[in-house]
Image: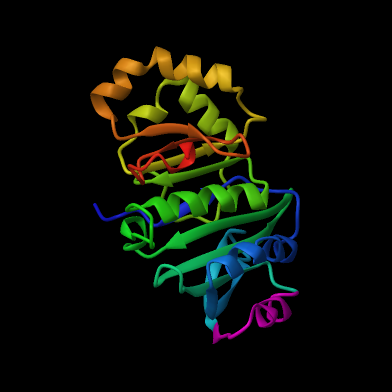
Amino acid sequence: MGTPTWFHFAAVQSTPAQLFSRVESLRREHRFKPRDMARLSRNTESGELEFQESTLRQVHEDAEVLDAARTWDGFAVAYNVLSIQATMYLHFWRQDRGAGFAVEVDTQVPYREAPGMAEGEWLERFMCAYAATCDSSACAYGRDWPFSFESLEPARLVEELRGGKLLKRPLPGFYLLSPSLLSGEEVSSLLHAQEAELAKHHHLLRYFRTSTGHHVLSSLCRSDWWAA
């Protein structure tokens, strides 16, 4: 199987435009240059979001994105990320309880080594910062999380961690949970109880907490950058 490319997030209380603007600082920090955008619209029969290839257009500034997508159900933007010389795609859409969103990366991004960083460190750092900036309570990435314009249900990750299924999922993997969902004490207890399983099957899956208190289980990078 190929390298996974899709990061699912839990929905947030926001509009897609507000959410897009909220992460402007991260895009600016990492020199995201918009290249193309397209509309996401709902199929009238199924109600599911679909990529509208006929709306694909070139863009040069984020202001163009907001102006074009003002009345859309959702939109996708392709960026050239100059800090790592790669392509990433940011997706945003409306849903009943707010806004859904996802990040798609090209297959080389998980292996990139930004200046002064280990392989995969840039991506791991970025996804932690992206989730925190968007105020999302959960994120999932891996071979069992395919492309879908469906928001992640945080309860699913919590249930899988408590039941032991999460640690048995195939690698690579990246799972993030808000401290509002699980306490540090409970996570430590769960990981201790599953220590043998973790060592046997997924010794590359590391657990750490970010500066915002989010719980992260990830195999993207081998560097303990979060401990510095």
Compare residues 12 and 177 and report the one nearer the observer.
177
Q: Is residue 27 left or right of residue 135?
A: left
Residue under the point 38% across and 33% down? 206
Q: Is residue 182 above or below residue 29?
A: above
Compare residues 190 and 209 and report the one nearer the observer.
209
Compare residues 226 and 40 and report the one nearer the observer.
226
Magenta segment includes 60:
yes
Q: Is residue 159 above or below residue 206?
A: above
Q: Which residues are magenta?
A: 56-70
Compare residues 62 and 160 and report the one nearer the observer.
62
Q: Is residue 30 above or below residue 138?
A: below
Q: How is the image coloured?
A: rainbow
Total number of numbered labels? 0
Q: Is residue 170 left or right of residue 114?
A: left
Q: Quadrant of residue 203?
A: top left
Residue under the point 58% across and 36% down? 214
x and y, in percent, of residue 204 in the image: 30, 35
x and y, in percent, of residue 188 in the image: 49, 19
Residue under the point 66% across and 52% down? 134
Q: Is residue 58 left or right of residue 117?
A: right
x and y, in percent, of residue 79 in the image: 50, 74
Magenta segment includes 187:
no
Q: Quadrant of residue 5?
A: bottom left
Q: Is residue 179 above or below residue 106?
A: above
Residue under the point 65% across and 52% down? 133
Q: Is residue 224 left or right of residue 202?
A: right
